[in-house]
Amino acid sequence: MLIRRPQPGDSANIQPSQITTETVYLDRRRLLQAALATGVSGIGSAWAAEQQPAVTVLKSKRNPAYVAPEPPNKYEDIGTDKGSPAVNSTKFKPKPWSVNITGQAEVTGKFSLEDILKPHPLEERIYRMRCVEAWSMVIPWVGIPLGAMLQRFKPTAKAKYVAFKTVMRPTEMSGQQMPVLQWPYVEGLRIDEAMHPLALLAVGIYGKTLPNQNGAPLRLVTPWKYGFKGIKSIVEISFVEREPATSWNIAAADEYGFFANVNPQVDHPRWTQARERRIGGGLFDARVPTQLFNGYAREIGSLYKGMDLKKFY
Amino acid sequence: MSPTLVRRVIKPLVFVSCSIPALILLWRALELGGSDLGTNPIEKIQDTLGQWGLRLLVITLAITPLRDWFSAPWLISLRRMLGVYAFFYVLLHFLTWLILDQSLYWPGILSDIGKRPFITIGFAALLLLLPLAITSTNGMMRRLGRRWKTLHRLIYPIALLGVWHYYWQVKADVREPLVYVTIVVVLLGWRWWKRRLKPAARPKPGVASAG
């Protein structure tokens, strides 16, 4: 039988062998850009900054807490031919980079990316990534824990939320010239979500610096939430008292909630979230069941105790 | 345009042209000549087939206005073939969803058709296309006579459902669906305008006129 039916527990554990291959990952981004350009679809912090030619290999230590015990395979010996994006541009400059830390914290100001990263050893973490459009990947990120980094700025008791802002450079990021969303892209987390050890500030992917189209040089990764929460090319992090208005939520509040936690029980108005397509599979591979909090319920579940997840989607 | 030229050259040419998108998909699915369908092949197949289904529906709908605007009566002889091709692509689009995307997982399929408005709409368009496809043979045309034309006016709601289905499926950037909406509105609006202008030209009000 060619068609494999979804089995419960199919995606219960990430094995390194399940990591989406790098070529497939990069190609996916290219497809999405093309799709956005033609209006077929859209994506998270959708903009079409293109791949820069220079990629630096990053030294990082794999964090064993976020990976299955088997050794990695597959993604280390991948060519780049298919990964080269359809549109080649070197317009977007992720260097030099600085981040503005503002709001309810004792330490605020403008910090260079190097200063932001310096005290934290880079970690590699293999996370599931679930897009709100019901596809998924397994991605090896390189980055630092968001919470530990935020603590350095000593948020005050008034800091109930953290807001993130993408750089606004319409000439370098052609997507920002289109009135699809309100630019610049804004995302946010509740402070306890931001402080959770799972939340990652990524600077790399597949052992190398982030390519431009993946959010260079600094992006958010919250694997228990839908992909669009992973704001890219962050230039501002604010500690705020009130829930920040976020881009997709402004565009379509009934479809994209502030929390955007992965939840197979809460459908998107236009499609079911019960199952997902794993990118990189064959034509006849069936969708796999989606898990609550994208499989991170044990780590993350306590954050939402007593909350009506249907109401706060 | 001589009838022989239309029959011998133009019709076969259009027939072959309409099959090209499907053949390209097949070519890429078999990864011939180093091609492929990209990272999410199923989505690619489904999108391409749906796009061509909609395009051919719109082209079919455009035949009558084009005939009038360019005084090209021979265009009508292409209309049925284009319509059948539209059905062909829409059907493959649906089967891709059913077999490749949903893996014949019936609980999911049935709840999607019932609960997801854009799928409900797309499915309704497919159902309405069925009688048109079935009655597209010469024998059926003869048997139905004048009623054939009335029945085949179903293409008007079908085209509207088709663009609506596309519009609702898009996440945020609706520019392309809006292009289709505009074209369909123009094509249908023109028909309405023509009917208003020449009520006398119609043999029996409410029965049949130019399709």
Image (spheres, coloured by chain):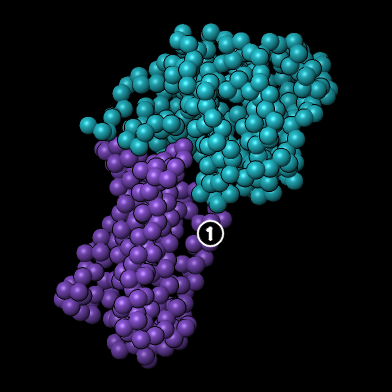
Q: Residue at label 1?
A: B178
Q: Position of residue A7 (x, y in %)?
A: 30, 23
Q: Amino acid at mark 1?
A: Leu
Is residue B149 toward the left or the right of residue A119 in the image? left
Q: Which chain letter goes with mark 1? A: B
User: Does the image show residue B178?
Assistant: yes
Say above or below: B206 vs A289: below
In the rendered image, which quarter is residue A90 located in?
top right
At x 20% / y 74%, what residue is drawn? B138
Looking at the rendered structure, the secondary structure element under dot 1 is helix
Give the residue furthest to the bottom: B200
Instruction: Report crowding for label 1: few under 14, some 14 to 19, many 20 or more residues within 10 A (C-alpha).
Output: some
In the rendered image, which quarter is residue A258 located in?
top right
Chain A as rendered: colour: cyan
Disc count in the image?
A: 1
Q: Position of residue A199 (x, y in %)?
A: 60, 18
Q: Is residue A202 or residue A161 the one in the foreground?
A: A202
User: Does the image show residue A201?
Assistant: no
